[in-house]
């Protein structure tokens, strides 16, 4: 009895050896064979798509992965009913999404369709793992013109075919607590930074603060300093894609942002360690009177604050009524939808993207998630005519600019985001934050950027 | 120790191995010799295969990648990534250049973190083990409670500590600032200088029960006669601990220190759960530093080169440690 | 199996020793138990309370988090995944370790030293070095044999079993060394083959060591985050990764995190504490000779 269990183990072991041998062979062969020539192509017509199954990786947009799954499943069923294509859905949390995409890109084994944060577009585009959306591809989903220009500009590097299609759009606005403003005798929300700081100081009393910022969240930091630099006419990369972190405008932008804690003291020191959206909690619970956030309505509501209790206006500018770069008040935030280049179901995948970007679905999904449809036709829907969404939609169309669409964008976020976080930590610990210390931090970040 | 193993005793064919008995009839000599010499290899085979698949082959693969310029431009066709020669290594060891400087900083942080954590874990572990050596009321309960941190899933423990370290609403500042008035304002634990100490505290909390457990086991092996003899000579409890307990625990200590050192040096969970993928500069452990290079900056060549350097360092440290303490089972008894 | 030999001190303890003991043990207990208390008390608070300033005594208690945890994320599903993966990894790891340790302990053969040194040195591999290569290998195995390792429980099981294998082999070899060879010889005289001797004599005598190694293997797998985050998908996700989902886009449900942690820890802690006697005994003769 015992020896037979041993021999079966040996058998299993032998199978493993065989597997290992095959692996080595496969390693030599490389992953190129996964080019994914879709032989079940167009000639056969739409009917041949029926019965195919595609895999879809969705990002977390709602209150939980399960809630997202329920929301999306309802919509996917409609898709399956009309096309016969089945969709295997997986909702992936933000903590894991990029790693999963990276692993998929490397191995060639991934989903057919996936959501990506739009700031990743150029980086993922550079890997060559995503299908380029040329005019023909856009033709299958009704053309490029259906989408807002700013959203398309956030879907890949300039001068190349976009790597993805906009799915949900968001923009930053300044959220303010109406009651706290009234109590402090402030009639109108600020339109310039000087006003914001002055108002903030009035509002900062007795454990309440004028502003809340998500100081330890690298991505949030990046979004804000991008806008603050843009308002000074500066960008974080030059035309060739080389980093320009250390210019005087960039330093001033970072300093202005960190100064909300360091010298203006209108944000609580504790904000320096906020990384889990405590900003929203502080705002919704009346601990802070203002915050700059993107499409926050559902999150604010989940904390029990009523829509009538707060207002949304564009983020301030340096001077009142600024236009052009100086008038930029938000990055173009949002989620894009991409097709994995190695897909074996290209046509089914395109049919699915067409469905998700159809005007009706855009209304439904963006309505559920509190975002703005990048499909312009869908924006007229009453669901997006609420006061806050109207403001954000106007920001998106008039005063939002895409983050630098360069291949090294993710390194930018990864190096400069934490640098700002460190500066916040200094400020919170009472260490001085000066032009020099900001410049030193940015210089160090720039030196670590890969040459390309 | 086991210096006297019976070398290759011809194993009798037992009734339990019918198959090979049949084989022996066909080719008695070869099978017999194969069984004699081959059995140990057969015994090791499954373990060797598993190690090959998960550790060894991927490691050589990783070393290969470390000589490639595997950045985001190539990951989709990693085979065609250009060879980088020693460029990744050069960048990693140039300590006056940003990448090397950052790596060196991370190395020092990791080394300090590891040494502190191991020393404190060992200290607490031995104190507890020695103090619990004698029987007294409540001893069993205390021993059980001490093992709880080791039994808790790492994630649950880490997230709880993170919760306690929050600046505004956490327990640590509530006690230090609100209740004991030790600090003039609430300190930060998850960012800035203190983040290093927060990480050390959590690490000690997680790993000292292991030292405790192993040392308790070690204490069982000390013959009671030694204590009795010492007591006859008039040695008090403190002297007994110093003269008998501590020296007798030396072999145990050597193992614990090495094992804890290796675990802590490669620790990924603690900083990752406490701080996310961008830990504060002061808490930039090497495992997460490499993770950033590889998975966030998408430069797997550079990340692999750093890993290989880390591996070499650990190999050298372990080898020296084993030579100095002359404990390595294989050296003693082959 | 009472391996805890009680050692009443041969001599009356002086006051200084008793006081040191009281103070040190009290401090240690506080250090150990405060986080456990925080976990427990926070799990019984409403979300609003846990987000507010910490209070030692909650002003109101609610069991709602314990109800909600099952709805916010598929906790039961993740729990089952974790149990399947960790138990299987433990069983295979220990089985492999027993064979290998027996070989190392009872035979002298060429390559023995190479084997022990190599296996032990894999203990110091930084996980990050082989995460991506392993992923690629799994995908390639999948492509060429049809055995899905990437994203499957099987892949994670194989991975985890090797994490604990080196240390397990080392400990068990030490434990086996401490079992007198005469016992094997006697079994062989009784007509057992070497494997018969292993299973009829050595393994039964090594139960404490095997239990200790099993617990170690289980705990190693149970808390692993890095590989699980890349190598699992929705249907195979383990607890260590899944628990992070209580931090959603809108909120971190601290009270539910704590409640879920307690729920999933209870069986493990209970099992661990039940086995602690074996642990001490196992380590006694294993690593710690």
Image (spheres, coloured by chain):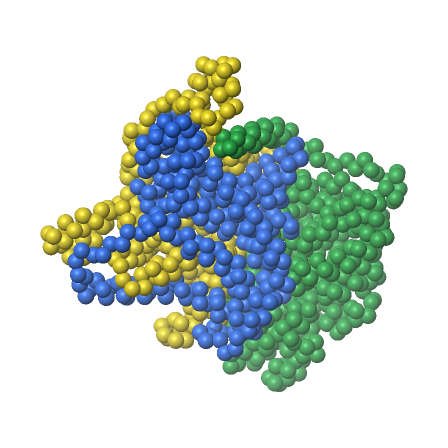
Give how far across and how far down residue B185 sits, in percent. Answer: 42, 73
Give how far across and how far down residue C220 sits, in percent. Answer: 47, 48
- Say if B16 sits above or below B172 in the image: above
Please tell me which residue is depicted at 56% across the width and 61% down the height of the picture: A217
Residue C13 visible in the shown view: yes
Q: Nearer the viewer, residue A252 or B216?
A: B216
Please tell me which residue is depicted at 44% across the width and 48% down the height of the picture: C215
Chain shaded green: A
Give how far across and how far down residue A161 sits, in percent. Answer: 76, 46
Q: Nearer the viewer, residue B200 or A68?
A: A68
* Total numbered badges shown on the rendered structure: 0
- Say if C163 sits above or below C106 in the image: below
Chain shaded yellow: B
Please tell me which residue is depicted at 50% across the width and 57% down the height of the picture: C267
Chain shaded blue: C
Give how far across and how far down residue C43 sits, in percent. Answer: 52, 68
Residue A317 visible in the shown view: no
Q: Quarter of the image holding residue A330?
A: bottom right
Is residue A375 toward the left or the right of residue A174 in the image? right
Is residue C21 toward the left or the right of residue A400 in the image? left
Please tell me which residue is depicted at 22% across the width and 46% down the height of the picture: B223
């Amino acid at each position: 009895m015992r020896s037979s269990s041993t021999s079966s183990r040996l058998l299993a072991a032998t199978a493993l050896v065989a597997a290992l041998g095959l692996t080595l062979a496969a390693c030599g062969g490389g992953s190129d064979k996964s080019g994914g020539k879709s032989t079940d192509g167009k000639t056969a017509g739409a009917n041949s798509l029926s019965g195919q199954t595609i895999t879809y990786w969705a990002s977390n947009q709602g209150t939980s992965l399960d809630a997202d799954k329920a929301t999306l499943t309802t919509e996917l069923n409609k898709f399956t009913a009309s096309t016969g294509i089945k969709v295997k859905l997986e909702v992936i949390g933000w903590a894991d999404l990029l790693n999963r995409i990276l692993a998929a890109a490397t191995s060639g084994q991934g989903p057919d369709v996936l959501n990506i944060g739009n700031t990743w577009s150029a980086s993922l585009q550079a890997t060559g793992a995503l299908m380029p959306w040329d005019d023909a591809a856009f033709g299958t989903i009704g053309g490029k013109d259906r989408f807002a220009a700013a959203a398309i500009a956030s879907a890949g590097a300039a001068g190349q075919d976009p790597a993805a299609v906009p799915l949900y759009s968001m923009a930053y606005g300044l959220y303010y607590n109406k009651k706290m403003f009234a109590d402090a005798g402030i009639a109108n929300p600020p339109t310039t930074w000087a006003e914001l700081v002055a108002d903030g100081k009035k509002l900062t009393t007795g454990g309440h603060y004028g502003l809340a910022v998500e100081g330890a969240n690298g991505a949030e930091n990046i979004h804000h300093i991008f806008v603050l630099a843009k308002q000074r006419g500066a960008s974080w990369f030059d035309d060739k894609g080389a980093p320009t972190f250390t210019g005087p405008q960039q330093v001033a932008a970072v300093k202005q942002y960190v100064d909300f804690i360091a010298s203006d003291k209108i944000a609580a020191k504790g904000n320096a360690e906020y990384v889990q959206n405590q900003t929203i909690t502080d705002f919704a619970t009346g601990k802070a009177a203002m915050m700059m956030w993107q499409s926050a309505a559902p999150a604010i509501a989940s904390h029990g604050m009523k829509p009538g209790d707060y207002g949304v206006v564009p983020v301030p500018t340096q001077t009142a009524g600024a236009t052009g770069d100086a008038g930029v008040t938000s990055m173009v935030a949002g989620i894009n939808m991409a097709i994995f280049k190695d897909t074996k179901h290209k046509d089914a995948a395109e049919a699915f993207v067409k469905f998700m970007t159809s005007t009706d679905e855009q209304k439904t999904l963006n309505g559920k998630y509190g975002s703005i449809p990048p499909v312009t036709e869908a924006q007229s829907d009453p669901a997006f005519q609420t006061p806050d969404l109207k403001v954000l939609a106007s920001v998106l169309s008039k005063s939002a600019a895409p983050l630098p669409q360069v291949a090294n964008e993710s390194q930018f976020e990864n190096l400069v985001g934490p640098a700002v976080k460190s500066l916040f930590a200094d400020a919170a610990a009472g260490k001085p934050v000066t032009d020099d210390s900001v410049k030193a931090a940015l210089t160090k970040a720039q030196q670590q950027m890969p040459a390309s | 120790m086991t210096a006297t193993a019976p070398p290759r005793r011809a194993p009798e064919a037992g009734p339990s191995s019918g198959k090979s008995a049949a084989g022996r009839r066909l080719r008695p000599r070869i099978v017999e010799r194969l069984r004699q010499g081959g059995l140990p290899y057969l015994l090791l085979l499954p373990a060797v295969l598993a190690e090959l698949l998960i550790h060894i082959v991927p490691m050589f693969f990783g070393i290969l990648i470390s000589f490639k310029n595997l950045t985001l431009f190539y990951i989709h066709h990693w085979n065609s990534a250009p060879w980088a020669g020693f460029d990744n290594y050069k960048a990693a060891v140039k300590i006056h250049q940003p990448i090397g400087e950052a790596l060196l900083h991370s190395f020092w942080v990791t080394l300090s973190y590891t040494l502190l954590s191991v020393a404190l874990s060992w200290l607490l572990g031995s104190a507890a083990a020695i103090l619990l050596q004698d029987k007294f009321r409540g001893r069993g309960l205390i021993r059980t409670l001490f093992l709880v941190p080791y039994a808790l899933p790492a994630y649950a423990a880490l997230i709880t500590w993170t919760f306690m370290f929050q600046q505004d609403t956490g327990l640590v500042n509530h006690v230090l600032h609100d209740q004991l008035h030790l600090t003039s304002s609430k300190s930060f634990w998850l960012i800035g200088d203190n983040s290093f100490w927060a990480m050390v505290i959590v690490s000690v909390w997680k790993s000292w029960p292991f030292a405790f457990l192993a040392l308790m086991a070690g204490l069982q092996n000390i013959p009671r006669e030694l204590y009795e003899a010492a007591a006859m000579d008039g040695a008090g409890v403190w002297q007994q601990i110093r003269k008998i307990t501590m020296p007798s625990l030396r072999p145990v200590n050597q193992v614990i220190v090495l094992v804890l050192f290796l675990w802590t040096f490669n620790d990924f969970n603690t900083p990752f759960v406490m701080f996310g993928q961008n830990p504060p500069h002061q808490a930039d452990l090497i495992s997460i530093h490499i993770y950033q290079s590889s998975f966030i900056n998408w430069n797997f060549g550079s990340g692999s080169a750093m890993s290989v350097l880390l591996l070499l360092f650990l190999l050298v440290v372990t080898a020296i440690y084993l030579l100095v303490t002359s404990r390595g089972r294989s050296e003693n008894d082959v | 199996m009472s391996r805890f030999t009680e050692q009443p001190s041969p001599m009356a303890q002086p006051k200084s020793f008793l006081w040191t003991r009281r103070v040190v043990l009290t401090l240690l207990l506080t250090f150990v138990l405060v986080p456990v208390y925080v976990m427990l008390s926070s799990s019984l608070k409403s979300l609003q309370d846990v987000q507010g300033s910490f209070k030692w005594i909650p002003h109101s208690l609610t069991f709602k988090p314990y109800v909600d945890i099952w709805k916010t994320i598929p906790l039961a599903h993740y729990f089952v995944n974790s149990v399947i993966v960790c138990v299987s990894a433990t069983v295979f790891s220990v089985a492999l370790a027993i064979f290998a340790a027996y070989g190392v302990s009872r035979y002298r053969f060429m390559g023995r030293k190479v084997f022990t040194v190599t296996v032990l040195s894999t203990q110091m591999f930084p996980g990050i070095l082989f995460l991506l290569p392993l992923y690629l290998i799994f995908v390639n195995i999948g492509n060429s044999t049809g055995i899905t390792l990437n994203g499957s429980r099987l892949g994670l099981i194989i991975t985890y079993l090797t994490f604990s294998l080196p240390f397990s082999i080392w400990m068990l070899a030490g434990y086996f060394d401490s079992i007198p060879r005469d016992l094997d010889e006697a079994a062989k005289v009784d007509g057992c083959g070497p494997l018969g001797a292993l299973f009829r004599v050595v393994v039964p005598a090594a139960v404490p060591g095997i239990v200790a190694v099993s617990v170690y293997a289980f705990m190693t797998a149970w808390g692993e985050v890095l590989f699980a985050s890349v190598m699992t998908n929705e249907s195979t996700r383990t607890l260590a990764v899944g628990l992070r989902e209580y931090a959603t886009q809108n909120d971190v449900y601290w009270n539910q995190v704590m409640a879920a942690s307690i729920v999933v820890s209870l069986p493990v802690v209970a099992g661990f504490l039940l086995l602690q006697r074996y642990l001490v005994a196992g380590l006694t003769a294993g690593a710690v000779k």
